[in-house]
Every structure is written in C-alpha cells, then in structure tokens.
Image (cartoon, helix red, strand yellow):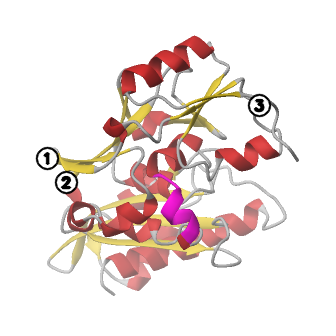
Amino acid sequence: MIPAPFEYVRPSSLGDAVAALREADEEGKVLAGGQSLMPLLRLRLAYPEVLIDVSAVPELRGVRDDGDSVFVGAMTTHYEVLRDPLIRAHAPLLAAATSTVADPAVRHRGTLGGSLAHADPAGDLPGVVLAMDGVFVTSAREIPAGDFFADYLTSALEPDEILLGVRLPKAYTGWGFHYEKFHRTAQAWAIVGVACLVRRTDGEVAEARIGLTNMGPTPVRAYAVETAVADGPASREAFRTAAQDAPDGTSPPSDLHGSAEYRRHLAQVLTARALATASGL
C-alpha cells in the first residue's frame, strides 16, 4: 500500500527539529531509522501531515560518559550500540538484547531512540531500559523509564517533544546479565522476553532486576521475583520457585503466536533461565 501524502522536513539542528514539530501542531511525526515507522505509513496505520527526519541532527548521535551514567543518543544505531566500548563496559545487557533485534540490515539502520519511542511492548529494548532504571532525556525534560511507557505503542512524549536519548546508570556495572528471548524465527518479535541483572555476593543473590517483554501493553518489571530472590541462594531450584511469580501484575495478550496463559508459562520458564544464566549457573 502507498502511504498517505505528507510533507518531508529534514532539519539540521535540534532547535529546528523542535520548531518543525511544534509547527506541525500534533500532525507531525519524527522519523529516525524508519524501521518501525515506515511499515505503519505503508499500511496507513499512521498518516502524519509532516514527517520530520532527524537523521541530520548531530545532538542526537553517539554515546558518552556522564560520570555515574552512560548517555546513549536517540539516533545511535543498533549496530553502533553493539560495538560501543562504554556500553560493553557499563550496559552489556543492552548490547546483549540489541544483538537479538531483527537482522543485521535492520540493526544497521534502526536506532535505539526510534525503538524506544515506538513503545512496542514486543520490542526487545524497552524491557532492558526498564530493568536498568534508565532515564529518558527529551527536548523538554527527563522521564524515568517506569513513567515513559504509557500504553500500547504509546509513550509519555508530548506531541512537540523529541527524545534526545537515554541515560543508563553505571550502578549495574559488574552485575551478571542475560536477555532470554523466545521467538518463532531469528528475525521475529519476542513472544516473551526477559531482561535480567543479578548481583551476587558469597554464593547468594544480593539483588536482581528483571524486565519482561510482551507481557502486557507496556514492558513490565517483575518486582515479585526480584523480591523473592533477594538475599537468597543462587540456585536453579530457588530461581524456578521464585520465577513462578513472574506473571504477577501482568496482562499478556492472546494472539496467533500464543495465548495469554502460554505467555504466563513462558515468563516463568524464561525468568528462571535468565536468572540462572545471569548468575553464572
């Protein structure tokens, strides 16, 4: 299908991009890598009057050290995320999950900010940023990850607000990590995914952070599991027991790929696996 007609704008500065978005008066859409937006345009599930291409805005690119955190620009591609030494050192969970996104062609073109702003609950990266207590930095404010994902394909971004990037705390440097994903084919969306961080001391789990993919209209933190494993033994049996609480507070969808009950079961199995792998078992 051919997209509906739209005006194309390609600003070269952040100020011009924000001005163009405001001038569009809620009828504008920001274009980053286009891997999520272009299919919606072709299917006419989105039909903006103005398309604002931010690929030429230098402020949105790159990774930098911000002291106690790492800032990842919204226009940083998945390929760049995978290769960046700061991310490998301080946010390896993000790199691990990014390596499972689609295929190399998509990873070379798609961007971190585009994936997060699209707010697809089946996307691999929102659950990671949620588990890491990331902070979204926009042209107007900062938004904690827990407040950013509002509903299905809906973020907290205002119509005239542009995502600049995400700040990931270095507090998880040295923690064990793993992203466990169940999908039909290598390029498919996750039926369920689990982003997991574990800090161990003396053979026990001191702390854990767990984000769930595709277990509701937004990514979900498995707080019940985090509490259950804290200060407990790092064993497969303990993880299987704690992971029974993974579906608590979730509302997984039923679709052609699996029922809600199937996804609840997957969440339990994959959470136990992710905890074990992140703990080095």
- State the CA–CA distance, disc 3 to disc 1: 40 Å
Q: Residue at x 41, y 43 (%)?
A: 74
**What residue lies at 46% left-to-right and 71% top-to-bottom?**
99
The mark that comes first in sequence, 2 or 3, is: 3
Sequence-first disc among 3 and 1: 3
The Cα–Cα distance between marks 2 and 1, rounded to whole angstroms, is: 6 Å
Q: Secondary structure at mark 3?
A: loop
Q: Amino acid at mark 1?
A: Asp
Classify mark 1: residues with Cα within 10 Å, few (<14), some (14-19) or many (20+).
Answer: few
**Whole-percent x and y of residue 103?**
58, 72
Q: Residue at x 59, y 59 (%)?
A: 247
Residues packed near mark 3 inside 10 Å, few (<14), some (14 to 19) or many (20 plus) = some
Residue topped by disc 2: 170
Instruction: Write the residue at 39% across / 80% down.
Output: 276
The answer to whether residue 148 is magenta is no
Tell me which label, 2 or 1, sits earlier in the chain. 1
The residue closer to the viewer here, 243 or 69, is 69
Q: Which residues make up the magenta segment?
A: 105-111
